Image (cartoon, rainbow, N blue to C red):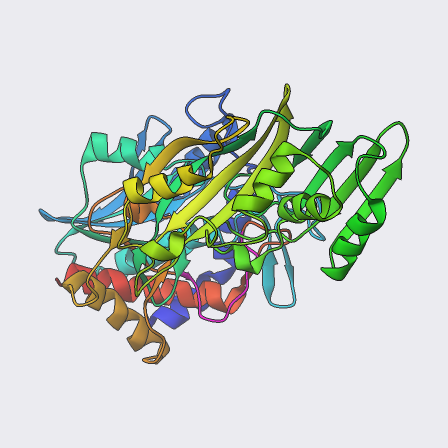
Amino acid sequence: MDVKQFIDENLENMKADLADLVSFNSVYNADEKPFGYENKKVLERALEQMQEKGLKTKNLDYYCGYGETGEGNETVGILAHLDIVPAGDYWDHDPFNMSEEGGFLYGRGVSDDKGAAVASMYALKYLIDEKYPFKKKVRLILGCNEETGSLCIKHYVEKEGHINYGFTPDGNFPGIYAEKGMISGKIIGHNTKIIDIWGGVVSNAVCAKVYAKLPNGSFDENKLTAFLDKNHIKYEITRGETFDIEVYGDAAHASTPDLGVNAFSYLMEALYNADFNDSFVNWFDKYFGLTLHGEILGFTSVQDDVTNTSINFGVISKQGDDIVATLDMRFPVKSNVEACRKLIEGCEDDKNENEFAFEKGVEPLYFDINTPMIKALKKAYEDVTGDKETKMEAIGGGTYAKAINNCIAFGCEFPGEQNYIHDDDERLNIESFKKQVELYVEAIKNLNEI
C-alpha cells in the first residue's frame, strides 16, 4: 500500500491515539517516583498502543519504555517523550481534551511531543504491515522526563546501552546538527525591599506573568508606569497596605527568549527606572537588564560561527528573606561549561548580597553534516518534501540527542510553523501530522540501509 493511502486510512485512528495520550496531565511530580503517577499511566497506555501496532514492548521501571521491530546487530532508535510542561492559565481550548478546529489539533503535548510519538508509531506500523525487510532492530523509545532532566534516557542507556543511529522527533525539520550547551542555576538576592514576588511556570520557559508586593512610597509610581507603557507592557495595580502589581509578558521556550517577553525582567527594569533603591534591583540592572544574550557579562567572547548565548529567567519567588529566580542559559556549541560558568559567575558582588548559584551544566552537541547518519536524514526530508533549500540548523534547545550517542533532533516542526510549544493553545497542523509519518518512514528506511 502507498504510504499516503495508509496515512489517510489511519488518520482518525492517529487522532484517537493522540487524544488518548493528551488526556494524561503528565507533568513531572517529584512526590511520585520516578516522575509522577500520570507519567506512569501515559507510558502504560503508549506501550499498549505500540503493542496494538505489532511492536514488542518493554517497560524500563517507568522511566521509559520502548517498542521494537526488526532484527540485526545494530539498533536504530527513535526517541520521543510523553511528559509535558504545565498547561498554564489562558487556554481557549481544553488542554487535556484534544479538540480540532480549522485544520489544527489543540491540546498540551500535541506538538511537544506526544504527536511525534504517535506519528512514529504509525510509521513503524506501516513498515511492519508492508513486511519491510529490516536489517537492523528499530526501537521507538518513549521517555517520561525530557522536560525536567532526561533522566529517563540516562536510565535507558544504563539498562540497554546506546543506539547506533537515530533521531528524536522533538525539534525541527530538516534536522538539527548542533545543540547549544546548557547551564542552569539561580540568581539570589539576600537583601531586598521587595515584600513578596512570584511568577513563571517552569525554568525552561520565559516568565509570562509576575506578581509583586512593594512598600508604598518606595519608588516613583509615575516613572514606573511610564516605563511599562513606553515598552507596551501590560500590568495591573492594586493599592492598599502595600503596592501590588501584576506584570504580563509572553511565554516562549527558554532557548528562544527573543520570541517572548519576560515579565520579570521588565518589572525589575521598571523598578530600577522608578528609583526603587534596592540592592537586588540595582544588581539585576547592572548585569542583566533587558539583555537576552549575556552581553553585559561578556558572552560575546565565546560566540562562534554557529550559535550565540541566550539567558532566561523562568520561575521567580520570595523564599524567606531572599528573592530567587531560576536562570536557564544556552551557550555556543564550540564553547564549554567551564568557560561559560566563569563568565556567569562574574555577576557576583563583593558584599555577597547577590549571587549566582550554579546547579547543572550540559556540554554542547555537534555533528559534522557530512556524516552518513546526517546525510540519510537530510535525504529523507528532501525526498519527501522536495525542499532542498532549507538547511539543517543549530539550536539553543536541548533534546534527547544529548543523552544518548548517535542521535540528532529530526522533526517534528516544519519550517515556518508556529505550534505554540510550551505556550497556551499548543497546536498541531493535521497535514503536518500526516507528513510526519511519511518522513519518519523514509528516515527509518534510510538509516536501515547505512
In the rendered view, would you say 117 is above or below 61? Answer: below
- Residue 308 placed where, x, y %? 38, 58
Query: Could you tell whether 170 is left or right of 251 in the image?
Result: left
Residue sitting at 45 percent across and 49 percent down? 113
- Residue 128 placed where, x, y %? 27, 56
Query: Could you tell whether 262 is left or right of 287 in the image?
Result: right
Q: Which stretch is magenta?
A: 412-421
Quadrant in which residue 146 is drawn: top left
In the rendered view, would you say 43 is above or below 137? Answer: above
Residue sitting at 12 percent across and 56 percent down? 135
In the rendered view, would you say 264 is above or below 324? Answer: below
Quadrant in which residue 272 is drawn: top right
Residue sitting at 63 percent across and 33 percent down? 279
Query: Could you tell whether 55 is left or right of 422 in the image?
Result: left
| Dominant secondary structure, magenta | loop
Quarter containing the N terminus: bottom left
In the rendered view, would you say 184 is above or below 410? Answer: above
Please say whether residue 420 is one of the residues in the magenta stretch.
Answer: yes
Residue 54 in view: no
